[in-house]
Amino acid sequence: MAEKDNNINAWKFATNAIHIGSEADKETGAVITPLHMSTTYWQEAPGKHKGFEYSRSGNPTRAALERNLAVLEHGRFGLAFASGLAAIDCVLRLLKPGDKVIASDDLYGGSRRIFTRAYERYGIKFVYVDATNIKNIEQELDENTKIIWLETPTNPLLRLTDLKAVAELEKIKELRERNNDKNNKTINYPLIVVDNTFMSPYFQKPLLLGADIVVHSTTKYINGHSDVVGGAIILNDETTYKELKFFQNAIGAVPSPFDCWLTLRGIKTLALRMEQHNKNAQKIAEYLANNKKLKTVNYPGLKTHPQHELAKRQMTGFGGMISIELDGSFEDAVKFATSLKLFALGESLGGVESLIGHPASMTHTSVPREHRLKIGLSDTLLRLSVGIEDADDLIRDIEQTLEKI
């Protein structure tokens, strides 16, 4: 839904997170967005209604969430979905046979799975590159390229792509001029799509750096309480929005009103939570950095991270995600992951509680092993989603577990 409030220009993030989409209800004065469970809406005459006709097409609670998300990402339009992958699927519906997608080579396993297992069969080509080097993207750009799909930081290796540098590539500008008929409103291919799940809009705003579309698994930091599955798309271009809005309605992978209501509730504390995630992760990463039982510690907030300076320019914080590689065996990695007391072994990330995952056997099982090893995703790599517990307690938990390895 289009953003309708100009206060975004005056208010800061935490204020927008609490107030946009949550204005007092005109009927009752309630300060919390009502939960509209109705599936259908009364019409005075066919097509004459108050903006809503059927809840797959639009729901007042979902509209409030979509407006909130758009404002937080500095976008004009937001679309909410039943999962992050449903949001990804909607963006991919913009493609047709013969089109090409350039993607980060170490992106989330579920993204790669939908690319290769669901969309390659329709004649769409996916090329994976090391997106830390902009030249690798530039070399693959051609007239068939319709999407540049980026994660920054990547999942789970936490590598960064310079979004501003990608957006300023002359070759992209040339392709857009060639692909688009200036006499018609067309989608501005190639589109730069950024999965911003790891950073949330609190720490990174890709649209301000030149991206065309931002996607989120709102299941993660945006909701933040591990009790809702959801996804989102945020963008500025009206032509692209209308196409995606059509797919959202036609395909129907929309969230329930209650899920939207819970997500709005979670967003109210997003700023506070992200600050604590960041504070805890920084402290834990610095503790881990010199541990001899670890081969590598990946965290953009460490000065040893190869793109630390880019992280400082591109983001306003470093987030709550860390990945570590044990100097040991697969069995050691499993033992470490199952011996922790405060870090629960589980899928997902971004909740208030700390989680640990083993990508090779959990989130990235669909990625061929030879490719995993090639990009550095080994059998002893572990991903930590640092929660908002006391950091000293989390460090003690890690310390006692490392002693067992």
Image (cartoon, rainbow, N blue to C red):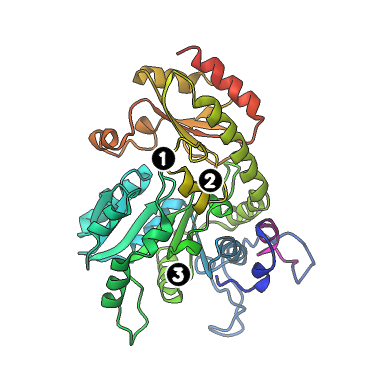
Q: What residue does disc 1 label? A: 306
Q: Tag 3 or tag 2, which sits nearer the N-term?
A: 2
Count residues near mark 1 (Cα–Cα under 10 Å), then give few for <14, some for 14-19, many for 20+: some
Indicate the amino acid at tag 2.
Answer: Lys
**Residue at (27% x, 59% y) in the render:** 138
Q: What residue does disc 2 label? A: 220
Question: Foreground mark, 2 or 3?
Answer: 2
Q: Are marks 1 and 3 in contact (CB under 8 Å)?
A: no
Q: Secondary structure at mark 1?
A: loop
Task: Please tell me which residue lies in front, 355 or 256.
Answer: 355
Indicate the amino acid at tag 3.
Answer: Lys
Q: What stretch of residues is rendered in magenta?
A: 14-24
**Could you say where residue 323 lies in the image, as x and y percent from the top left?**
45, 33
Indicate the amino acid at tag 1.
Answer: Pro
**Could you say where residue 156 lies in the image, as x and y percent from the top left?**
41, 38
Mark 2 → mark 3, Cα distance in angstroms: 23 Å
Q: Is residue 136 above or below residue 300?
A: below
Q: What residue does disc 3 label? A: 245
Most extreme residue toward the top is 404
Mark 1 → mark 3, Cα distance in angstroms: 39 Å
Question: Foreground mark, 1 or 3?
Answer: 1
**Residue at (59% x, 53% y) in the render:** 202
Q: Secondary structure at mark 2?
A: loop
Mark 2 → mark 1, Cα distance in angstroms: 26 Å
